[in-house]
Image (tube, grey):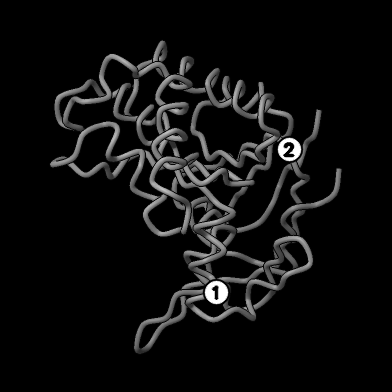
Amino acid sequence: MGSIIRLHNIHKSYFTKHNETPVLFGLNLEFEEGSFNSIIGQSGSGKSTLLNIIGTLDVPTAGDVYYGDTRATDMTPAELSNLRNSMIGFVFQSHYLLPEFTVFENILMPSLINSKSSEEKRKRAEELIELVGLAKQKNNLATDISGGQQQRTAIARALMNNPKVILADEPTGNLDSVLSRTIYDLFRDINKQTRTTFIVITHDERIANETDRIIEIKDGKIIRDAAK
């Protein structure tokens, strides 16, 4: 296995008119294809900023992000959009489903950007609905299913375009311990079946301790990087 993502000397600051607020300080990381990684740290440590930079939703103040041999920090906004659509699936604590659409339609949504045929898209969506156990809810509106089912819908949506990487920011933060375990087990099954790389921010150390690698951030620096 090779590295699918590399971060070199990543610094990030946010600027106001008179102030600079540094958030990340010279981070160097590599993520292997097919690996399952967690990022932990206290609120305000820089975890979400790091994940947004990995996902090219934010740009570093200094340093470089590579996907394979491609330097993402050189890409135009259109090229970055294509990279995200083809390579990355996002799962957030707030699932951002479209309430006026059904479970099936929400899952199908990312595929509308690419050029696959409608038949291929619908077949893929049907497969994902089965994978996340929502066959009976496929025609329900997103507002008419439980929180756990909404998060499963968001996971299926993230997988719609066969991404090589899933980035998840506190994906079980709004769920109880039983549902959190269900979502984690689903992630693990997908990771094993498809060799999709997972990078998961979690506040739950029990979950983090079961991942292949724990990266701990404190005050914008890596204080632990432990692989099992």
Q: Residue at x 56, y 71 (%)?
A: 12
Question: Does dot 2 land on a helix, a strand or a loop?
Answer: loop
* Left or right: where 1 falls relative to 220: right
Q: Residue at x 34, y 19 (%)?
A: 134
Residue 220 locus on image (x, y percent): 59, 58
* Left or right: where 104 falls relative to 126: left
Dot 2 amino acid type: Gly
Give above or below for 204 relative to 93.
Answer: above
Q: Is 88 in front, or is 221?
A: 88
* Left or right: where 65 falls relative to 115: right
Q: Quadrant of the N terminus?
A: top right
Q: Which residue reaches farthest bottom?
A: 17
Q: Is 176 in front, or is 20?
A: 176
Residue 127 image label? none
Q: Residue at x 48, y 21 (%)?
A: 131
Q: Is 91 in front, or is 107?
A: 107
Which comes sooner in the sequence, label 1 or label 2? 2
Q: Which residue is mark 1?
A: 79
Residue 23 locus on image (x, y percent): 53, 65
Residue 34 image label? 2
Q: Which label lies toward us, 1 or 2?
A: 1
Circle 1 residues within 10 Å: few <14, some 14–19, many ≥20: few
Q: Residue at x 60, y 50 (%)?
A: 218
Q: Are marks 1 and 2 in contact (CB under 8 Å)?
A: no
Among the 4 quarters of the image, the one containing residue 61:
bottom right
Residue 128 locus on image (x, y percent): 45, 28
Give above or below for 181 relative to 14.
Answer: above
* Left or right: where 65 falls relative to 175: right
Dot 1 amino acid type: Glu
Question: Does dot 1 land on a helix, a strand or a loop?
Answer: helix
